[in-house]
Amino acid sequence: MITLADVEAAARRIDGRVRRTPLVEVEPDRFFKLEYLQHTGTFKTRGMMNKILSSEVPEAGIVAASGGNAGLAAAYAARELGVPAEVFVPVTAPAVKVAKLGKLGARVVQVGNEYAEAYAAARERTGALFCHAYDDPAMVAGNGTLGLEISGRSDTVLVAVGGGGLIAGVIAALRDTAKVVAVESANAQALHAALQNGAPVDVPVSGVAADSLGARRVGDLAFELATDAGIESLLVEDDAIVDARRRLWDDYRIVVEHGTAAAYAALTSGVYRPAPGERVITLLCGANTNPADLG
């Protein structure tokens, strides 16, 4: 199981290579962790940096499968560390993410209509270091470093969940100091279903947040940590996610992707109701989206 010590070791390893992102109080006892300001606009850069730096990388470089964000993180980390990168993404990946992958120097291969199909194709690639988007100890520990930056600052942390690589790291970093709450799209509820069934299971994936929260099955590491820590998983509907994303723009001029807005939707929709005086941090973890529909 990934521990606080693993996260602290990852923080030392990636120090100076990732941004320490701001924590802002937007109203009394309500905070945003602005992780969307991370390199490539996603928290996954932390995990990818830690994965590559803690591994022996072959001459062929790295390969990753992604709905978009993990690929961006892999491409950026590989470029910064001087290794080749190949990224498999579904044909449904947002054009903004695919274009950015090319700009970062990665070879992009588009396969299938969802992450699971891109993942299967990537696993057939031989000779390169495979970097799992979320179910990997080094990825989880690296992602958890953002938790160290908010330790002691809140009672509760709301985390959007797809495959579970972020919440697993946050649990490892904060389980002894804060309540960690999972928030999932009702149309992509991999962790929620796993907790109900007592083991990871395949779930159908659809909805506005599928490009970033579209894992068909939660990672084993996330399930293990969530179960051990007794994590609660809340579900939010698509209309609540869309509304939360627009509120972030209207009220704070923050542009995020739908998957990121899911965490805030727990508050705006009333699915999560904080107690009086409860300090709540919402992790805003990714901003790779087309803002045209926010105008």
Image (cartoon, helix red, strand yellow):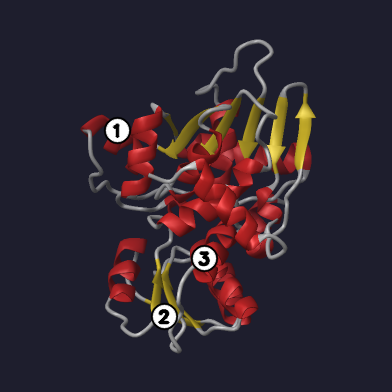
The kind of residue on which mark 2 rests is Val
> Looking at the picture, how far across and down is residue 277, in whole percent?
69, 13
> Looking at the picture, how far across and down is residue 67, in whole percent?
44, 63
Q: Are circles 2 and 3 on residues that touch, CB within 8 Å? A: no
Task: Work out whether mark 2 precedes mark 3 in sequence or the reverse, and give the earlier one.
Answer: 3
- At 28% from the left edge and 36% from the top edge, which residue is drawn? 193
Q: Gap in Å between the C-alphas at discs 3 and 1? A: 30 Å
Q: Which residue is mark 3?
A: 94
Vertical comparison of 21 with 110: above or below: above
Q: Residues within 10 Å of mark 3 (few under 14, many from 20)?
A: some
Q: Which residue is mark 2?
A: 109
Please indicate whether residue 289 sits to the left or right of residue 232 in the image. right
- For the question of whether residue 123 can be seen, the reply is yes
State the quadrant of the N terminus.
top left
The kind of residue on which mark 3 rests is Pro
- At 36% from the left edge and 47% from the top edge, which residue is drawn? 221
Q: Residues within 10 Å of mark 2 (few under 14, many from 20)?
A: some
Q: Residues within 10 Å of mark 1 (few under 14, many from 20)?
A: many
**Mark 2: secondary structure:** strand
**Mark 1: secondary structure:** helix
The kind of residue on which mark 1 rests is Leu
Mark 2 vs mark 3: give the one in front. Answer: 2
Q: Gap in Å between the C-alphas at discs 2 and 3? A: 14 Å
Task: Work out whether mark 3 precedes mark 1 in sequence or the reverse, and give the earlier one.
Answer: 3
Q: Which residue is mark 1?
A: 195
Residue 81 shows which numbered tag?
none
Q: Are circles 1 and 2 on residues that touch, CB within 8 Å? A: no
Please indicate whether residue 39 sits to the left or right of residue 212 in the image. right
